Image: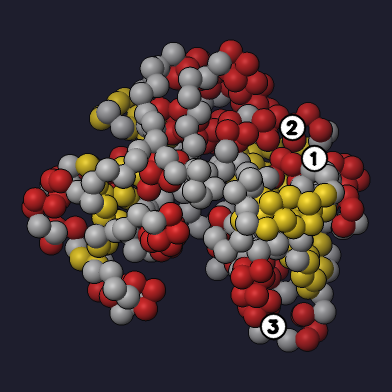
Amino acid sequence: MGEKPGVAAMRFVHAPDIGSAKQILRQLAQTPVVCAPRKVEKPLVLYGAGNLGRMAKQYFEQIGIPIKYAVDSNPEPHRSDLFWAGVDIISPEDAPPRERSEFLLAICVATTQFSRLSAELGSLGWADRVPFYDIAEAYRDRNPLGNGWFSGKLGQADIENIELVLSGWQDDISRAHHLQFIAWHALREDWLFDDAPVTIGDRYFIPEVISLLRSDEIFCDLGAHHAEVILRFMQIMENRFKEIWAIEPDMMNLSLLRAELQKFKPEIMKKIHVLACAVGAQEGRENFFHGLGYVSQLCDLGQHLVEVTTIERLGLEPTFIKLHLEGGELDAMRGGVQSLKRCRPIIAATTYHNRLGLWEVQKWLMDELTNYKFHFRLHSWCGTGAVVYGIPGERPTQGKSNEMPIM
């Protein structure tokens, strides 16, 4: 199965073809599962003061678990950030040796290989290191954040369906990233494929997508958050597009999204439409958890009932649709299957928020959409940043440079 330099990492030289991928999957499925969620039973320290560290700070505040302080490899820029007011931020080597030995260190970084970062921190004396998302999984009764899910042992149905999906990918890179994704969620192992690296900066806009984009795109962003992806799309297109539809149900996110878009000239703004609604498999009213930023979502823990509509009911005609719905992607696509079949858009859907991402999201797309090419890419580590891309076979390449800048 490749060279295994340490307990938490596995290295492969080449991305696997279909036969090799199935063989690797079968061996993975026979490996005992020993990982589990982690409760906080000792003083807690955060490693990483970037985007994920900020989310972790808000998360622990929301569920009532105090943090002692934060450590970061470059603490100085964060110390003047008002967001961290009241929290000491120090270098990992500056913490007292006893605390490095006895405290729990939640690693809040997903932009680099976890096993390598964990080993570096271990060499500095941090004895108890755990991915932040492993802790979050232990408190799902308080907060719906679900990126740390554990697949458990793969059953026979899982294996058979994953094999079908592995056969359906357009390229070996997709098979490598899919196996890497499964290995993290099943075993909490980092798998590395030398010729299939994780790409951090091109989420939703991989070269296979950029090369197809044209000036009459109707881009639909489901889960638009603060317009980050919309802004990237606009930059890539140099503002040459037909329409943008931004769908966002969280009121706080919506306010910031609208403020960001208001910066553009009227001739651009008239092509951008913002809808405050939740999208699901069917119309109705469901609980929605507001105020969690990226993590706001339809869930049983939600404080308020919101109206839920469907892609079909919205009557949109997307040529490119992006879905980031904290695990609700499959429901949203099921509620818009006729629109997807009629409009045949480029599809970019996240798959890392729950166990549906092992194979059910991917297989549904492969079963429902004919003459599509499907790719799977990882854009971050720790089992996150996984996106399935669907590209209609009839889409001609426009010759747009794969090197166009992305924000």
The quarter in which the N terminus is drawn is: top left
Q: Which residue is mark 3?
A: 262
Q: Are marks 2 and 1 in contact (CB under 8 Å)?
A: yes
* Secondary element type, mark 1: helix
Q: How many marks?
A: 3
Residue drawn at 80 percent across, 71 percent down: 273
Q: Kindly tell me whether residue 172 is visible in this rendering.
A: no
C-alpha separation, residue under disc 3 versus residue under disc 2: 37 Å
Q: Residues within 10 Å of mark 1 (few under 14, many from 20)?
A: many
Q: Amino acid at mark 2?
A: Trp
From the top left corner, tell me how far across and down residue 223 is, in percent. Answer: 67, 58
Residue drawn at 69 percent across, 45 percent down: 329
Foreground: disc 2 or disc 1: 1
Residue drawn at 74 percent across, 41 percent down: 331
Residue 242 in which image quadrant: bottom right
Q: Are marks 3 and 2 in contact (CB under 8 Å)?
A: no
* Secondary element type, mark 3: loop
Q: In the picture provided, is 138 more to the left or to the right than 305?
A: left
User: What residue occupies the far left of the structure in this picture?
Assistant: 97
Q: Which residue is mark 1?
A: 334
From the top left corner, tell me how far across and down residue 127 is, in percent. Answer: 17, 42
* Nearer to me, 97 or 231: 97
Q: Residues within 10 Å of mark 3 (few under 14, many from 20)?
A: few
Q: Which residue is mark 2?
A: 364
Q: Are marks 3 and 1 in contact (CB under 8 Å)?
A: no
Q: Amino acid at mark 1?
A: Arg
Q: Which is more N-terminal, label 1 or label 3?
A: 3
Q: In the picture provided, is 176 more to the left or to the right than 324?
A: left
From the top left corner, tell me how far across and down residue 393 is, in percent. Answer: 80, 40
Q: Amino acid at mark 3?
A: Gln
Q: Residues within 10 Å of mark 2 (few under 14, many from 20)?
A: some
